[in-house]
Amino acid sequence: MADNTIFGGKPVLEFSTGLQRRSFLKYAGMVGVGAGFVAGGLLGAPSAGAVTKARREAGLAATDVDILNYALTLEYLEADFYAMGLQAGLLTDRELELVTPIGDHEKQHVAAVTAAVTSFGGTPVAAPKITYPAGTFDSRDSFLKNASAFEELGVTAYHGQVPLIQSLEVLAAAASIAGVESRHAAVVASLLGTNPFPNPIEKNASMDTVLAAVKPLIA
């Protein structure tokens, strides 16, 4: 995950119910399991016992609908973040050409994950209230630095879900979106002049690491 703190560590999400907030935090902790599980099960893949332990420690059994709704919450935030950043007019020329499709992709991800939840007989989670800290969209650098940290979190979140997903259909969809999120992260890193592919394999993030990144975002 990126070293820089997302939104300066200030909360941006506010859920309408305590249940929704608790559920999001539980799955935020669970996605830290097996983030290295991206090379055909090699290098850091969790055992079945580890996955079962993660589910038990989270206090509930992870269903595919639960996991999809967790992903949907992050997609709501990503889609809104890019929409706000692009609307602020901070980018021009080639940078605008590269980032505009990212915003479009995030909107499509929201639609795709929402449809997936519905197709499995679930109810899509409601979008949380989103309030960004002052300065988020004041400059090109602020926007892109937050985007970089955000994309790294998104990649970790999707990869972390792999050992928890039961349906092959959902697994394929999650893997496809994770691949696109990785490309987004590389594009933004390039615009910031940093390494777009720092590791040969996505790093494994512990539960504590993921929670430390996510918790400050929640009011």
Image (spheres, rainbow, N blue to C red):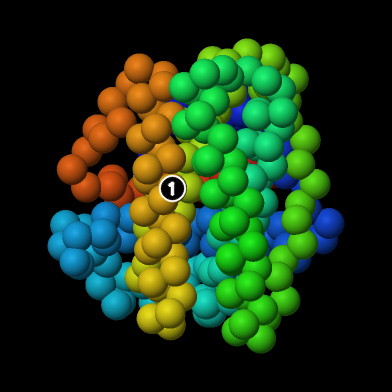
Residue 216 occupies quadrant: top right
Residue 33 occupies quadrant: bottom left
- Residue that sits furthest to the right in the current view: 16
Q: Position of residue 77 (x, y in %)?
A: 65, 46
Is residue 142 visible in this depiction of the protein? no
| Circle 1 crowding by C-alpha within 10 Å: few under 14, some 14–19, many from 20 | many
Is residue 68 visible in this depiction of the protein? yes
Secondary structure at numbered mark 1:
helix
147 or 211, nearer to the observer:
147
Q: Position of residue 62 (x, y in %)?
A: 52, 76
Left or right: residue 61 compared with residue 52: right
Q: Is residue 115 above or below residue 167?
A: above
Q: Which residue is mark 1?
A: 181
Q: Residue at x 76, y 52 (%)?
A: 128
Left or right: residue 123 compared with residue 202: right
Instruction: Count how many numbered circles sit on residues in the image.
Output: 1
Q: Position of residue 210 (x, y in %)?
A: 47, 47
Q: Residue at x 38, y 27 (%)?
A: 189
Residue 197 occupies quadrant: top left
Q: Residue at x 36, y 53 (%)?
A: 179
90 or 197, nearer to the observer:
90
- Residue that sits furthest to the bottom in the current view: 121
Q: Is residue 213 above or below residue 159?
A: above
Q: Residue at x 82, y 60 (%)?
A: 17
